[in-house]
Image (spheres, rainbow, N blue to C red):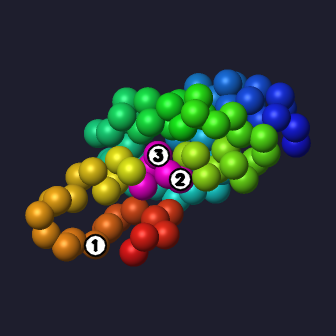
Amino acid sequence: MSQIDIQQKIESFTCIEEALHYFDIGFDSQFIEEYRTQLVKRFNGYLLLSRPDDWFSARRALKNAYCYVQRSRLDKYTRSACRGCTSCQRR
């Protein structure tokens, strides 16, 4: 899949759940309902910073966005682990 194909595919998504399903990333629907706008903004920001050239780089951008929003909910003064993030590799 070329860079143009993956960009067209990302543009065709009508909701973030479609992107999560397409990139095979597990998610919590309650989390998505609560943090939808933050997740979409972060994902679009990562796509602007580095244009994805294949499926894997686009998936990495979405996973990083999901994990960033998930980790931002944690207490910054304790050493709590990332919980509930099904795609987190920082556990």
Pointer 3 or 1: first along the chain: 3
Image disc number at residue 65: 3
**Magenta-drawn segment:** 63-67
| Number of other residues with Cα within 10 Å of mark 2, as a class: few under 14, some 14 to 19, many 20 or more | many
Image disc number at residue 67: none
Q: Amino acid at mark 3?
A: Ala
Quadrant where the image shows the C terminus: bottom left
In the visual, does 10 lie left or right of 61? right
The image quarter containing residue 78 is bottom left
Front residue (pair 19, 88) = 88
Q: Which residue is mark 1?
A: 81
Q: Which residue is mark 2?
A: 63
Does 43 appear above or below 82?
above
User: Decide: marks 3, 2 in contact (CB < 8 A)?
Assistant: yes
Q: CA distance from mark 1 to mark 2?
A: 17 Å
Residue 68 rendering spot, x and y as whole percentages: 39, 50
